[in-house]
Image: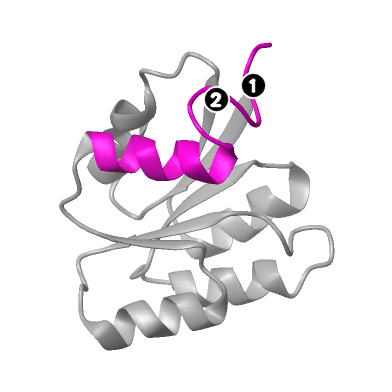
Amino acid sequence: MADILVVDDSKVMREMIVACLRPRADFAFTHASSGLEAIERLSLKRFDVVVLDLNMPDIGGIEVVEFVRGQDTLRDLPIIIVTTRGDDASRARALDAGASRFMTKPFSPEGMLREVEGLLGGPAGGVGATP
């Protein structure tokens, strides 16, 4: 079972991300509605992937990525940034901070699933796969 942390200040967007990933019965989801809540959840539980909004009202996505990359136990945690900001500067800033992937909203359900599966080792392998 792969544990995925979905972080977005919009409940509708969190639900959309989960809906994109729902075809995989071996994914479990935890929601966070802010950067601070994401950091709290990351401190209490191990996750296999984080899908993280860039723009949030308290602690932004970049700061969450920097926090994760600064923790020895979380340093290699895959993080997908999702945002309405598709400009090159936002992309470069997120990737330079340590994000694994960068996706702009709106995204296709297939694209989201493909990115998460890729970070987990593919649809037939990796975390949560059955032999």
> How far apart, in angstroms, are the residues tagged by discs 2 and 1?
7 Å
Q: Residue furthest bottom?
A: 89
**Residue 61 lies in the magenta-colored region:** no
Towards the viewer: 124 or 78: 124
CB contact under 8 Å: marks 2 and 1: yes
Q: Please provide percent x and percent y for residue 97.
A: 54, 80
- Place residue 93 in its image quadrant: bottom left
Q: Is residue 32 visible?
A: no
Please give the residue where the numbered disc 1 appears in the rendered image. 1
Q: Is residue 35 visible?
A: yes
- Place residue 9 in its image quadrant: bottom left
Look at the image and tell me in which quarter the C terminus lies: top right
Magenta residue span: 110-131
Q: Is residue 4 above or below residue 36?
A: above
Q: At x 32% / y 81%, what residue is drawn?
A: 90
Please give the residue where the numbered disc 2 appears in the rendered image. 28
Crowding near pointer 1: few (<14 within 10 Å), some, many (20+)?
A: few
**Residue 111 lies in the magenta-colored region:** yes
- Place residue 69 in its image quadrant: bottom right
Q: At x 76% / y 46%, what residue is drawn?
A: 44
- Colour basis: one colour
Q: Is residue 61 above or below residue 52?
A: below
Instruction: Please identify, in this view, whether the residue under mark 2 or under mark 1 is nearer the observer.
Output: 1
Q: At x 36% / y 67%, what residue is drawn?
A: 56
